[in-house]
Image: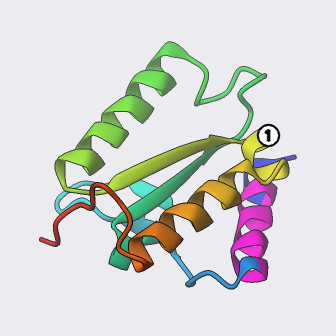
Amino acid sequence: MKQSELEELFAQQVKDRGLPEPSREEFIIPGRKHRYDFCWSKYRLAVEINGGTYTKSGHTTHAGITRDYWKVRRAQDNNWIIYPFTGEDVKDSVAIDEVAEHIDKVDKGKLLWMPISL
């Protein structure tokens, strides 16, 4: 399954679960050009779907992994929670289950830590 197909599958899973609609390919860090696949500003939650983890791709090379880790740290520095998932996580519903659980916990006030709003 291609990256865009994985993202479309995840978007459909979000809709099927009745979760709030995320923004897509959003720039969440002021002054940075890095986009995040799915973002829920209210929850300060961003999802990154990294397909192609079994093949040589941008997410499996040293440079790609280094860039992905840097991107996660920048988002965390700006009070965002980042959930990175593999293609298998999307196909097996692991990704949508974890996102739904996180949103539910925030909505019920049961999350131990929630980033502050800037």
Q: Residue at x 69, y 74 (%)?
A: 14
Left or right: where 76 falls relative to 1: left
Report if residue 7 lies within the magenta region: yes
Measured as percent of width and height from the top left, residue 50 is found at 63, 40
**Quadrant assignment for the C terminus:** bottom left
Task: Report the number of discs.
Answer: 1
Under mark 1, the amino acid is Glu
Nearest the camera: 93 or 48? 93
Q: Residue at x 42, y 50 (%)?
A: 82
Q: SS class of the residue under badge 1?
A: helix
The residue identified by callout 1 is 88
Answer with the quarter of the image where residue 8 lies.
bottom right
Report if residue 66 lies within the magenta region: no
Q: How is the image coloured?
A: rainbow
Q: Which residues are magenta?
A: 5-16
Q: Residues within 10 Å of mark 1 (few under 14, many from 20)?
A: some
Nearest the camera: 105 or 65? 105
What residue occupies the far top of the structure in this picture? Answer: 62
Rendered view: 54 above or below 48: above
Rendered view: 63 above or below 43: above
The main secondary structure of the magenta stretch is helix
Left or right: where 118 falls relative to 76: left
Q: Residue at x 77, y 22 (%)?
A: 55
Measured as percent of width and height from the top left, residue 52 is found at 74, 33
Answer with the quarter of the image where residue 110 lies.
bottom left
Measured as percent of width and height from the top left, residue 54 is found at 78, 22
Q: Is residue 34 visible?
A: no
Q: Is residue 118 visible?
A: yes
Q: Residue at x 21, y 56 (%)?
A: 79
Rendered view: 8 above or below 69: below
